[in-house]
Image (spheres, rainbow, N blue to C red):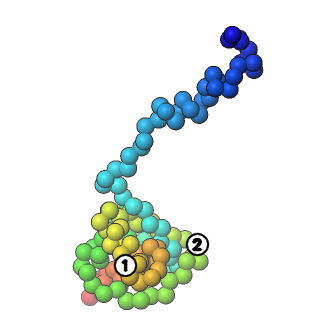
């Protein structure tokens, strides 16, 4: 016997919304060329310097930092050890391609540090090269 009132029906007869949603949803795929975002904490002076250089190159800080890091990773130079402080409240983002992000991950494993710390170290080496080019 089937009851009209759902309160008297058996639990197996009642379909919940969760079951319908989970069956109907498709698994969302990630793009193969997706960019990976790294948030790099900087102090005030470093941030101002990067902002000035980004303005000179007529680009955003994020795009400029991404370009610097990818250029530095392509050069395969040694990156000197720098003092890294994660306590800085202001940060700059770098959106790296998949290959560049994997290189940063490899360096973070090699140096036994976080991905942010490895990206900071590479960014500071790239900024030192930029300073030499600007002041020559």
Residue at the image point whose x is 51% and y is 70% from the top: 91
Give the CA distance from mark 2 to mark 1.
24 Å
Q: Which-is-in-front pick, marks 2 and 1?
A: 1
Image side of residue 105 versus residue 47, left or right: left
The one of 17 and 62 positioned closer to us in this rendering = 17
Percent position (x, y) of residue 40?
47, 72
Percent position (x, y) of residue 94?
40, 66
Of helix, strand and loop, which one carries label 1? helix
Residue at the image point whose x is 35% and y is 55% from the top: 34
**Dot 2, how many residues are within 10 Å of its Cα: few (below 14), some (14-19), or many (20+)?**
few
Quarter of the image with the N terminus is top right
Residue at the image point whose x is 53% and y is 32% from the top: 21
Eyeballing the image, is 114 above or below 81? above
Query: Is residue 103 visible from the viewing direction of this image?
Result: yes
Q: Name the image quarter holding residue 53.
A: bottom left
Q: Name the image quarter holding residue 49.
A: bottom left
Percent position (x, y) of residue 75?
24, 79
Quarter of the image with the C terminus is bottom left
Of helix, strand and loop, which one carries label 2? loop
Percent position (x, y) of residue 122?
37, 79
Q: Name the image quarter holding residue 5.
A: top right
Eyeballing the image, is 5 above or below 75? above
The one of 117 and 132 positioned closer to us in this rendering = 117
**Dot 1, how many residues are within 10 Å of its Cα: few (below 14), some (14-19), or many (20+)?**
many
The residue that label 1 is drawn on is 107
Eyeballing the image, is 109 above or below 4? below
The residue that label 2 is drawn on is 89
The one of 55 and 75 positioned closer to us in this rendering = 75
């Amino acid at each position: 016997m089937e009851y009209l009132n759902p309160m008297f029906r058996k639990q197996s007869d009642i379909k919940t919304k969760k079951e319908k949603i989970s069956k109907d949803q498709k698994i969302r795929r990630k793009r193969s060329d997706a960019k990976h975002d790294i948030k790099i904490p900087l102090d005030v002076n470093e941030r101002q310097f990067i902002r000035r250089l980004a303005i000179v190159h007529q680009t955003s800080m994020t795009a400029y930092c991404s370009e610097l890091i990818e250029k530095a990773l392509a050069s395969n130079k040694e990156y000197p050890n720098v003092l890294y402080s994660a306590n800085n409240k202001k940060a700059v983002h770098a959106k790296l391609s998949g290959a560049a992000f994997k290189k940063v991950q490899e360096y973070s494993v090699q140096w036994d540090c976080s991905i942010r710390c490895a990206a900071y170290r590479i960014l500071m080496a790239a900024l030192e090269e930029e300073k030499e080019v600007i002041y020559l």
